[in-house]
Image (tube, rainbow, N blue to C red):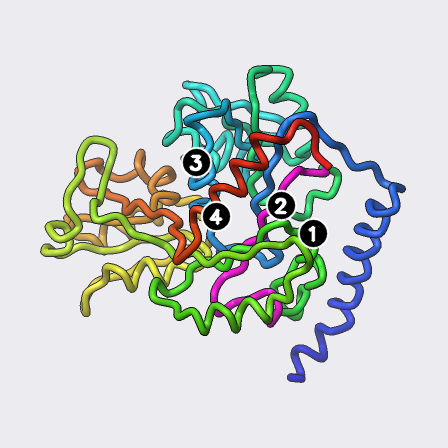
Amino acid sequence: MSFLLKLLFPFALLYAFITSFRTFLYKKGILKRHRFNLPTIVVGNLSVGGTGKTPMVEYLINLLRPKYALATLSRGYKRQSKGFVLANKQTLMPEIGDEPFQYHHKFTDIVVAVDNKRVNGIQQILKQKPSTQVVILDDAYQHLALKAGLYILLTQYNDFFYDDYILPCGKLRELRSAYKRADIILVTKCPKDLSKENQLDITKKLNLQPGQLSFFTYIEFSKIAKNKTSSISLDEFTAQDFIMVAGIAKPQSFFDHLKKPHTICMSFKDHHNFTQKDIEQILHQANHKKIITTEKDYVRLKDLIPCEQLYYLPIQSSFIANGQDFDKTILNYVGTSTTNG
């Protein structure tokens, strides 16, 4: 163990005790858990950031919205509002945060809401939008006051929870054993050609519990770069000089997908609120060249950079194999669920 880990170890023990004791209180019923009489799906992780929750939430939205009246509920990280907020046509990104605004901007036929307190959030959604049939909760795996009907746990390829440590020694929000709460474990951001042998080896290390399912997904990049007024084929876009900008947790795969030997890649911290100084720096680096960013960053940058100069590259979660089984599991749960248990 390195000196730094030894130094942090007592704090990790304290954090582990606090999170475990909290879980114990909920498990024993000392702290109340709330259930709702409609399907509730949690998409979350054990690690801090960067596992691909947003594309998976969008995958679920696309799967379910043809049949059901959907709502998404997030905490709205770094938003400038407080309490419960239900998005409407006048809602601006700072009011609900970048990820919820992306859902709101992209899927105009669903309910998008934010609330730090997920139980209150669902109650308000049902009060204000009583026709809601399914609620998808973004990043609520540690929100134990809610007893959801289905838990989907994400762990990133080559950054697995089973190889990690609890904060501050590692990046885990709670002990590894918390994976046992999940109904489905998704290994995300895999190489598209990940072999069956490697999948089997990872599955063994996941140590699946009875009834748990696991799947492997990869990030599929669009072949079209877009902005709010136009689109351009990626081949045509990359045939010219451009710069890349990202303010997400792990931008390297985005950069690697597009960059050329001399492409300028500007990286900012996750959920970064771009300042006027940042914009000036980006425009200076671009020097009138086109700028491409992630879809999440685009909702924060689109009103700050000239439209004709700024583009984003859409992504989606795709399954290496057995995607139909995943879809069937979700659709069966939603179709047959009347109460959560």
Seen at 27% across and 55% down, the residue is 244
Q: Is residue 191 visible?
A: yes
Q: Amino acid at mark 4?
A: Asp
Q: Which residues are magenta?
A: 147-163
Seen at 30% across and 61% down, the residue is 255
Residue assigned mark 2: 151
Disc 2 from disc 1: Cα separation: 7 Å
Seen at 68% across and 65% down, the residue is 166
Residue 331, how many percent across, how many down? 52, 36
Q: Which mark is residue 181?
A: 1
Q: Answer few, some or many: residues within 10 Å of disc 1's Cα (few below 14, many 20 plus, some between 14 and 19).
A: some
Disc 2 from disc 4: Cα separation: 16 Å
* N-terminal label among 2 and 1: 2
- Please tell me whether mark 1 sits on a helix, a strand or a loop: helix
Residue assigned mark 3: 63
* N-terminal label among 3 and 2: 3
Q: Would you identify the image quadrant in which residue 145 lies? A: top right
- Contact? badges 2 and 1 (CB < 8 Å): yes
